[in-house]
Image: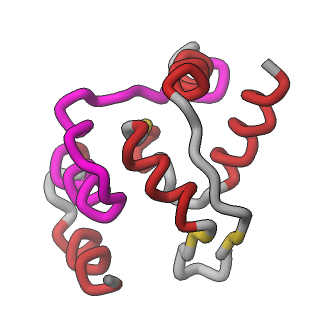
């Protein structure tokens, strides 16, 4: 559990990883973790040694986040088909922010 708690703290420190407290699917999360960097565009860029997490670790993280201790986190199985963070993020904003066209356009044009 300590490894999961350190991992959870690390993930919660990544800005914009959980838009609207929506938990990214394992494939999206691992694509981010394997990049070894997270560029937020707001001066909060982070770097780390690339790594992957397994299904068991992911399920523990989801269980902890959805328990309500850290907020109102949830996972959306309809959005779990993507492996690409930007595509997943656009789908989250489209579904939960009524399109938020200006946010989606910013995400698309940052690539």
Residue 63: where, in percent of width, then height? 55, 16
Residue numbers of the magenta segment: 69-95
Its colouring scheme is secondary structure
Q: Quadrant of residue 7?
A: top right
Residue 25: where, in percent of width, then height? 37, 38
Identity of the residue drawn at 84% across and 24% down: 2
Identity of the residue drawn at 70% across and 71% down: 47
Q: Is residue 74 inside the magenta stretch?
A: yes
Q: Quadrant of the N terminus?
A: top right
Q: Quadrant of the C terminus?
A: bottom left
Number of numbered discs present? Answer: 0
**Left or right: residue 22 compared with residue 64:** left
**Left or right: residue 3 compared with residue 44:** right
Q: Give the vertical position of 51 relative to 108 (above or below).
A: above
Q: Give the vertical position of 55 relative to 84 (above or below).
A: above
Residue 91: where, in percent of width, then height? 20, 52
Residue nearest the viewer, comparing 7 with 76: 7
Q: Is residue 14 inside the magenta stretch?
A: no
Residue 8: where, in percent of width, then height? 69, 36
Identity of the residue drawn at 80% across and 29% down: 3
Is there any visible trace of residue 22 in the rendered image?
A: no
Identity of the residue drawn at 60% across and 19% down: 60
Report the residue that reaches farthest toward the right: 2
Is there any visible trace of residue 104 in the rendered image?
A: yes
């Amino acid at each position: 559990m300590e490894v999961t708690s350190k991992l959870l703290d690390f993930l919660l420190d990544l800005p914009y990883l959980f838009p609207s407290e929506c938990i990214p699917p394992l494939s999206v999360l691992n694509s981010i973790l394997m990049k070894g960097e997270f560029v937020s565009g707001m001066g909060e860029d982070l770097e780390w040694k690339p790594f992957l997490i397994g299904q068991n670790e992911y399920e523990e993280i989801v269980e902890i986040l959805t328990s309500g201790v850290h907020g109102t986190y949830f996972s959306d199985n309809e959005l779990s088909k993507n492996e690409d963070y930007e595509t997943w993020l656009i789908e989250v904003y489209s579904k939960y922010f009524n399109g938020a066209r200006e946010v989606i356009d910013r995400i698309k044009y940052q690539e």
